[in-house]
Amino acid sequence: MDQNFSDQIAIELLQLLKEISRLRWEHQPNMELRPSENEFLVLLYLSIDEDKKALTASELSNLLKITPAGVTHLINPLEELGYIERLKDSNDRRIVLISLTKKGEQFAEALIEITSEKIGGLVDFLGEEDSRTFIRIMASVIRYLQENPLSANSI
């Protein structure tokens, strides 16, 4: 492949990836929260069930792939706004569990519904074949970038 052509494709790919990272979901049910807080509430909602009603900060840290301090940074404002609550573990009082309040559950459910509608619209827009191709290609891109991370100097 011609080096100039290859360089041009690389530039176009980088620009496209930057544009994707800049996209933000609009029409959120509540604009008082940051995107990271929205993600946190949805992840917590999807991680709890009948058997497990709350998670530890450590479990959340692992799921979000952030430090425990980062989890605390997310938890504090969400607790103040009434979306989550801290609970004591009945078996070990030293352990603090994080649970959604009714307000948090309703908000996460609304976010999931909006996201499902948006993604469903994208699938309808692309069609089945292009959607499957997009999934296959994006999975390959993610796998490649995980194995070969971009450095701050490369952007």
Image: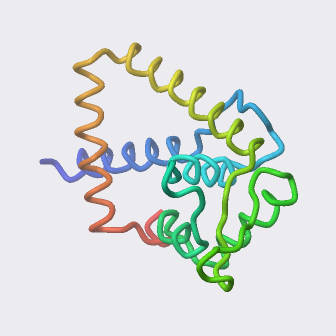
Residue 11: percent from the left, percent from the top? 38, 49
Residue for point 67% across, 79% down: 69
Within the image, what quadrant is residue 75 found in?
bottom right
Depth check: 22 or 44 in front?
Answer: 44
* Image coordinates for residue 145, horizontal then vertical, percent: 32, 60
Render colour scheme: rainbow
Query: Residue 98 placed where, x, y %?
Result: 66, 64
70 or 5, which lies in front?
A: 70
Q: Quadrant of residue 144?
A: bottom left
Residue at far front of view: 91
Residue reaching furthest left? 1
Q: Which corner quadrant of the image does residue 130 belong to?
A: top left
Residue extending farthest to the right is 80
Query: Closer to the camera, 77 or 119?
Result: 77
- Total numbered badges shown on the rendered structure: 0
Does 93 sit left or right of 120 as displayed? right
**56, above or below 112, in the image:** below
Q: Is 64 positioned to the left or the right of 29 in the image?
A: left
Q: Is residue 130 above or below residue 105?
A: above
Q: Is residue 80 left or right of residue 97?
A: right
Tell me which residue sits at (66%, 47%) in the image.
38
The x and y percentages for residue 134 are 29, 32
Residue 133, above or below 21: above
Q: Residue at x 46, y 26 (%)?
A: 119
